[in-house]
């Protein structure tokens, strides 16, 4: 069985993303992602703001093995 492809335009991501967006990119469900975050086992760094989790986009892309460098615009 083939996993469905993830449809997220990486160029539109801000400095941080929410847990559901990070979960889609990591290929797991929202519930599991929140459980991992609560246990301190999320695969990349999280920022906790009150009751909200944010995932730094650069850390998420590094975890996924993607480049965080900006394209050369010369």
Image (spheres, rainbow, N blue to C red):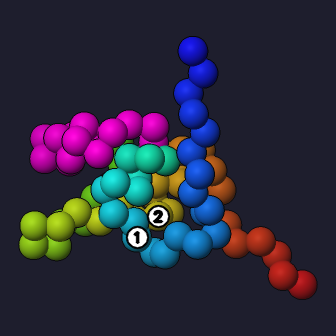
Where does the magenta region start and end? 26-42
Query: Element at badge 2?
Result: helix
Label 1 packing within 10 angstroms: few (<14), some (14-19), many (20+): some
Q: Provide residue 67's location: percent of width, then percent of height.
A: 65, 56
Which label belongs to residue 16?
1
In the current view of this chain or complex, which residue is farthest to the left?
Answer: 50
Say if 73 sits above or below 53 in the image.
Answer: below
**Which quadrant would residue 72 be assigned to in this image?**
bottom right
Which label belongs to residue 65?
none
Residue ID at (40%, 53%)? 22
The answer, for residue 42, to whether it is visible in the render is: no
Q: Provide residue 57's location: percent of width, then percent of height.
A: 47, 64
The answer, for residue 53, to whether it is visible in the render is: yes
Q: Provide residue 9's location: percent of width, then percent of height.
A: 62, 62
Residue ID at (58%, 72%)? 12
Say if 34 sits above or below 8 in the image.
Answer: above
Quadrant where the image shows the N terminus: top right
For this view, does 51 lie left or right of residue 8? left
**Which quadrant would residue 41 be assigned to in this image?**
top left
Say if 56 sits above or below 8 in the image.
Answer: below
* Chief secondary structure of the magenta portion: helix
Residue ID at (61%, 39%)? 5
In the current view of this chain or complex, which residue is farthest to the right?
Answer: 74
Residue ID at (49%, 75%)? 14
Q: Provide residue 74's location: percent of width, then percent of height.
A: 89, 84
Say if 74 sits above or below 35 in the image.
Answer: below
What residue is shown with label 2? 57
Lower position in the chain sequence, tag 2 or tag 1: 1
Q: CA distance from mark 2 to mark 1?
A: 5 Å
């Amino acid at each position: 069985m083939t996993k469905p492809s993830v449809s997220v335009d990486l160029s539109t991501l801000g400095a941080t993303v929410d847990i559901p967006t990070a979960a889609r990119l990591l290929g797991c469900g929202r519930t599991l992602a929140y459980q991992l975050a609560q246990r301190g086992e999320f695969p990349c760094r999280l920022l906790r703001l009150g009751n909200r989790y944010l995932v730094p986009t650069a850390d998420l892309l590094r975890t996924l093995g993607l480049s965080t460098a900006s394209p050369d615009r010369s």
